[in-house]
Amino acid sequence: MFVLVIIKPDAIRRRLGSAILKYFSHASWKVVASDVVEAGDPRWSQHYDEHAGKHFYDNLIATMSAEKSEIHLLASPTGTVAEARDLTLLVRRSSGSTTNANVEN
């Protein structure tokens, strides 16, 4: 089972990429593929297509396209769906809320 982790421009700017990956490797997840997405890359529009037309979409695409990001595919230690769900929750908890109303200051 795999989980996609995106290290967004603000984390790259703060040089947190390797610390973020170490965090997940301590849970025995392994990086099996990585890529750097350069500023202006049109793939963000495809990736976030499900949000097109929503009030935050234009700002999201502008933010993601402004600077480079990293994408990593992580593999679970045993390949179970439960592990993938657990990691997805861990990623969301460690990254903070993506809903403006729930973002902690």
Image (tube, rainbow, N blue to C red):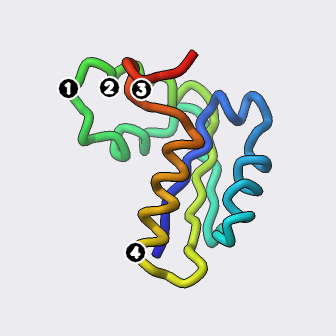
Question: In the rendering, which numbered label is found on residue 53?
Answer: 1
| Secondary structure type for disc 2 | helix
Amino acid found under the numbered disc labelled 1: Gly
Amino acid found under the numbered disc labelled 2: Tyr
Position in image of residue 36 (x %, y %): 64, 49
Work out whether mark 4 precedes mark 2 in sequence or the reverse, and give the earlier one.
2
Q: Which residue is mark 2?
A: 57
Give the Cα distance between marks 3 and 4: 29 Å
Position in image of residue 26 (x %, y %): 74, 64
Residue shown at the point (63%, 47%) measured from the top left: 70
Residue shown at the point (63%, 72%) measured from the top left: 32
Give the Cα distance between marks 4 and 2: 30 Å
Give the Cα distance between marks 2 and 1: 7 Å
- Mark 3 and 2 residues: CB-CB less than 8 Å, in contact? yes
Q: Which residue is mark 4?
A: 81
Question: In the rendering, which numbered label is found on residue 60?
Answer: 3
